[in-house]
Amino acid sequence: MASTGNMKGFYRQRKTTATKKSSKKSPIPTVIQTPATSSGGRKLDLQSECNESEVVLRQFDLNMAYGPCLGIARLARWERAQRLGLNPPQEIESLLKSGKVQMESLWGGRI
Amino acid sequence: MGIERVQCDYVSLDETFEIGKEKYHGQQYCHIYFARLHLMRTLLYSLVPHWKPNFPVCTVLELEEGKECVIVGTLYKHMKLKPRVLDEYSKQKSVVPLVKPHNFMHSDDYLVLEDESGRVKLSGNIIPPEYVTGIVVAVLGKESGAGDFLVQDVLDAGLPPQIEFPLKSGEDKYVVLVSGLSVGSSTSNPLQFQLLIDHITGHLGDEKAQLFASKIVQVVFAGNLVEIPHRILNGQNLASEDFARMSEPIRELDILLSQIAAGLPLDIMPGPSDPANFSLPQQSLHECLFPGSSSYNTFRSCTNPHCFELDNVRFLGTSGQNVDDLDKYSDAKDKLEFMERTLRWRHLAPTAPNTLGCFPFTERDPFFIESCPHVYFVGNQDKFETRIIKGSEGQLVRLICVPKFSETGVAVMLNLRDIECHALSFTLDL
């Protein structure tokens, strides 16, 4: 398997190649540079993003009861859930308002 | 001696149709479908215990074979003949003929019920020609061995609650509904429209006719006010005389409308051929297009759909796109039946955003009908038709199909006192 520094915490697998290991210079995650991924300027190092609050927020993103999470900011989605009477947990709101977390859903900017 | 025109209290309820602060930041239509499903499912869950008290309610994923239960979800109608963008790119010759049929129904169409957990094909006691994609219903039945859901009964939301019809003093007050003026088109006759204006403003006829005209309190133009020649709109470079031809219909319309605005309140709604946005809800035509008429405070440029109250009688109307789209994807004995269905489904335009252009709202569905109107009108239809429908809780609605004025010369007069209406016909035998 061709190895680079970014392999840790990266889920994608690659076919074993018979060629030399060090020839590839481009980072593995971005095989295709789509405008969405390049405009965000966000680091694609997924390991560091998986801290506790991010895990909680991702569970909120993936919870179907509050509707789709694509194309809407997390706080806006929380407020929508609130307005529709779905009683989303208060901790999510305080977490989002604290400002130290990613305001977009886990797919934000990548899809 | 002058006759004074009767007055009326007007309240606009168009706020829900205004796009205003809504932002488009690349979102897709899943949000409006979610809002619609959530709103209507909450409503249907409250109606189901009354409808089928002894059956459990479950989600699509919780279905078990042979277990009789009620599921609620959005309908999707799979239509063989529905044009698909991908057909243009398919290498083999497509089944669909190049000349598009007016109606895309086929005997092989089937319905699928969807909620967030999954989808299931429906069979049994549910007839695809009556339904379209986008309606939220509750169905009772059970899952068959083949994996479909065998429907025994269907529940739709029914007519929404209605504010009581105001008991009047007995005074006759008339509202005139017109649509499809198509000023600037080859079919419209300016003399016919001028006759209408003169009649409404009381410049025609003897004292009896003028007395009658003085009882008209409001005029509503339900869409297709102008028609700009198509060849000017197809994106080619325009010659200098074409610019004049492009703006002439609107200028002509402004002059005509200002004659009306000088006399009584009027509302204008945009339609499919007017210079407004294509997708629903169409926003009000800007007043800079009507320099003459907009100087009068009687002139109101409104959205499509349009909702307002006159002396506490609630009106709801569209310029026809919602019903015309239903006509392409389902079947009914007349246009009034489509209108009745939209009220019973509590949704003005269920085919939006599937086949009817729509703004991708994220937090609400503005086409959900919360309060039942007393008068429901649809413009730009082929002929004048009207009927009264009744709801299970005593609601009464007057349904009106307003015909295209440029083709029929017919406008509609509605009496606010008793919701009776009749046609106002202007024919020219030259």
Image: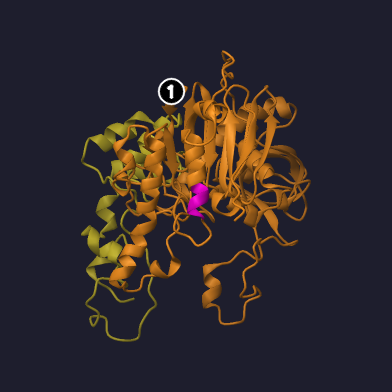
Q: What kind of element bears circle 1?
A: loop
Q: Residue at x 32, y 63 (%)?
A: B244
Residue B369 location, quadrant: top right
Q: Position of residue B270 (x, y in %)?
A: 44, 47
Which chain hosts label 1? B
Q: Nearer the viewer, residue B210 or B78?
A: B210
| Magenta-highlighted residues | B189-193
Q: Residues within 10 Å of mark 1 (few under 14, many from 20)?
A: few
**Position above or below: B63 against B393:** below
Q: Quadrant of the C terminus of chain B?
A: bottom right
x and y percent of residue A49 in the render? Answer: 27, 51
Q: Is residue A71 above or below residue B59?
A: below
Q: Which residue position is annotated with label 1?
A: B2
- Residue at image coords 57%, 22%: B172
User: Is B7 situated left or right of B160 in this image?
Assistant: left
Residue B35 in sight in this render: no
Is residue B19 in view from this perspective? yes
Measured as percent of width and height from the top left, residue B261 is found at 38, 36
Please state if B65 lies on the left or on the right of A102 as rendered: right
Foreground residue, B37 or A44?
B37
Q: Chain in yellow?
A: A
Amino acid found under the numbered disc labelled 1: Gly
Vertical side of B258 occupied by B209: above or below: above
Residue A6 percent location from the top left of the image: 25, 66
Question: Which quarter of the picture shows residue B240?
Answer: bottom left
Q: In the figure, the orange chain has which letter?
A: B
